[in-house]
Amino acid sequence: MKRTFAVLLIFAFVLLAEKSLLAQNAPQGANSATSSNDAITARAKKIHFSSLVLDTHIDVTPKLQSSWKFDERHNTGHIDLPRMKDGGLNGLFFSIYMSGTVTGPKAVNDAVQRIAAVHKLSEDMPDKVMLCRTAADVRLAHRQGKIAALMGMEGGHMINNSLPVLRMYAELGVRYLTLTHSVNTDWADSSGDQPKHNGLTDFGKDVVRELNKLGVMVDISHVSDKTFWDALEVSKAPMIASHSSCRAISGHPRNMTDEMIKALAAKGGVIQINYLDSFIDPDLFAYSQKTQAAQRELRQKYQNEPRETAFPKIREELAAQFGAPPKASWERIVEHIDHAVKLVGVNHVGLGSDFDGGSMPVGMEDCTKLPLITDALLKKGYKESDIRKILGLNTIRLLADVEGVSKQLRQAK
Ligand SMILES: [Zn+2]
């Protein structure tokens, strides 16, 4: 029994790849926006702060279920309402997340509570936050100067193998379902697990068809390559990669190959670039590969300690053995955006930061730094209208397209 627990614990650690052990960022000061944002041109600021900036994956949701306050400025984490204002971030998909090892009725129960926390947020501050279900809702929220709050469910395990449960999530406002998190579900293979189903099972294909009918986006971040290709074949609606970057730059299996990005875009989909340092930086990814076996051993060694004390010790011992991990720069984010745009054009790329879901690169310590991206794209020669697409309009278009397919499918039956 004890051994089983230990194995489970190691497994859980491996799953938490996004809650990175190699985290480098220190807590952020309240005025972190000022220093680097000072160098941003007036034109970039004007474009950025007049754009609808929409992020498709933020892991702040569990905090809403605690005494933490969304409308107060915090020194830790990556977002809150005051810092969203500073960074010009107008909308987000709150991630409905839990580990893929939580399944069955408990997963449904926990997911509903997390969804309820997002509903409550919009009810508690109706003048600041608007719960959005459609592209039109998001535009309305932006016009009214409110944060557009959407929900994306990060993992098919939460539907408890039930299409009626999925339907109810859609009813509650969930607007994408990531088919898997870091472990396989009973019907889809994950990029973080050993292949078991050769992609999607027949039921997995039914899930994709149901999502199309419901007008919920099929999210292929986290899934295995084969699951991606299966979903692409079945889906009648364009799909989203809610928080994934480019494997051509950094070989992490959570990133998409050029071939996958091209196929996603050819069917109207959008890749939302993930900012996590361990995903976007090839040197950091190489370091994590090189230290993988040692990390596993050290995690076992410190398995009885809480993460807060265990992780620093593990990092220290890894550094003693392999040297300090390389530092990733925020400019890598722009490199990934630019790579994807060069590959498939400007209509199929957006932002899916993974804020509060792991370690950010140096210079992108929190959402106050977002104007840097607009500034960098402008300096690269991007047109104003193209920057606005990347910042949010592509996601709005995708939402509207998926709504359109849903309408057609409902009428056809
Ligand atoms: Zn994720």
Image (cartoon, rainbow, N blue to C red):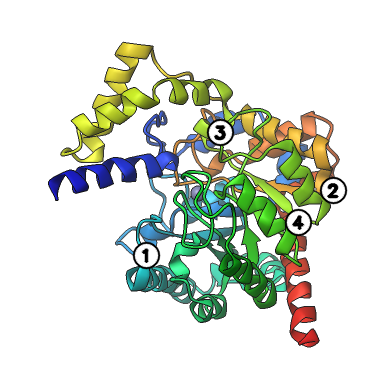
Residue 23, quarter of the rendered image: top left
**CB contact under 8 Å: marks 3 and 2:** no
**Distance between mark 3 and mark 2 Cα atoms:** 31 Å
Identify the residue shown where x is 28% and y is 32%: 311
Along the polypeptide, which appears first: circle 3 or circle 4?
3
**Distance between mark 4 and mark 1 Cα atoms:** 35 Å
**Distance between mark 3 and mark 1 Cα atoms:** 26 Å
**Label 1 sits on residue:** 103
Q: Position of residue 317 (x, y in %)?
A: 27, 18
- Against 326, residue 114 (above or below) is below
Identify the residue shown where x is 57% and y is 45%: 353
Mark 4 or mark 2: which is in front?
Answer: 4
Q: Is residue 41 visible?
A: no
**Label 3 sits on residue:** 252
Say what amino acid the circle numbered 2 marks.
Ser
Q: Position of residue 310 (x, y in %)?
A: 23, 33
Q: Position of residue 285 (x, y in %)?
A: 51, 26
Q: Residues within 10 Å of mark 4 (few under 14, many from 20)?
A: many
Q: Is residue 127 left or right of residue 19?
A: right
**Label 4 sits on residue:** 393
Q: Position of residue 149 (x, y in %)?
A: 56, 65
Along the polypeptide, which appears first: circle 4 or circle 1?
1
Q: Residues within 10 Å of mark 2 (few under 14, many from 20)?
A: few
**Distance between mark 3 and mark 4 Cα atoms:** 27 Å
Mark 3 or mark 2: which is in front?
Answer: 3
**Label 2 sits on residue:** 385
Identify the residue shown where x is 76% and y is 87%: 413
Residue 103, quarter of the rendered image: bottom left
Q: Residues within 10 Å of mark 1 (few under 14, many from 20)?
A: some
